[in-house]
Image (cartoon, grey):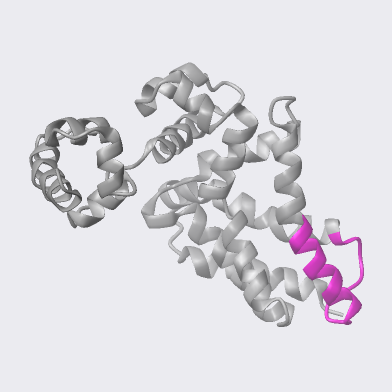
Amino acid sequence: MAEGDSRGRILNRARVVVAMGGKPTVADFAAAAGVSRAGFYRAFKSRDALFQALNRVPEPGSRDRILAAAFRMVGERGLSSLSMDELARKAGVSRASLYRLFPGKGALFTGLVRTYSPLEPVTRVLEAMGDEPPEAVMPEVARAVYRTVYARGENRTGLLRALFFEVSSLAPDTEGAVREVIASLVGSLVKYITTQMSAGRLRPMHPLLALQSFAGPIFFHLLTRPAAEQVLGFEMDGEQAVAELAETWLRAMAI
């Protein structure tokens, strides 16, 4: 069968396979079209390439499903209590696939941080605005944190509590990953704050204490905001609230 004929047959049969639902694999598409896996890959570089040719968005891959399930589980009970076997069942993957993608809780922690935490949004703010004064940068850092924790209407404070606990406890199976996170996020913020102190824009003090005094009120606000809304009727816009906390910090740090 010519390569063009194989491609057309795979596309035609793939529409039927997709319409049947589920999460069809490359083997399923190849079998439906009567071609080998090698024949499938000659026609399409990947499963995602087939979905692109069909003008369809593929369902989440194994990695995304694992992280989504881990996000829910960690938010409910913390990372230390998470069972990797239970995670594999909830994500709908085999134990072997789970450990291939995430060899242990340290790798899982890193994946959760990079996907769901403010680490990368804050890093992007610092990369884009690193030459600007604290009055512009720090409120935007606070807003980036808020947007991440409440992304798309999703409340990620459970994960935030779990990540804080991991950073505080340095459990053996996540210690290496935690140190990497601290070096990445805290390091970039401390570097910015230290530079601003040297430039005379912020009051000199230990930069780590300065960072803690900035992050502490914002962290507390994020954790208590749901209760404040439900019990106390707190109605201030979230981004405005954390920006005001950042501005309070700026006034305290002014020379």
Residue 71 inside the magenta-drawn segment: no
Picture coordinates of residue 143, whole percent (x, y): 55, 66
158, above or below 206, in the image: above
Image-quadrant location for residue 153: bottom left
Which residue corresponds to the image point at 91% horizontal and 77% vertical from the top-left?
198
Say if 168 sits above or below 192 in the image. above
* Quarter of the image with the N terminus in it: top left
Residue closest to the eye, 179 or 26: 26
**Position of 207 compared to 165: left or right?**
right
* Residue in the picture at 86% in, 62% down: 207
Residue 57 seen anywhere in this rendered image of the structure: no
Residue 107 % position (x, y): 61, 34
**Residue 205 against residue 79 in the figure, above or below:** below
Q: Quadrant of the C terminus?
A: bottom right
Q: Quadrant of residue 10?
A: top left
Is the magenta region chiefly helix, strand or loop?
A: helix
Verify whether residue 198 appears in magenta: yes
The residue stretch that appears in magenta:
187-207
Question: Residue at point 46% right, 48% down?
Answer: 226
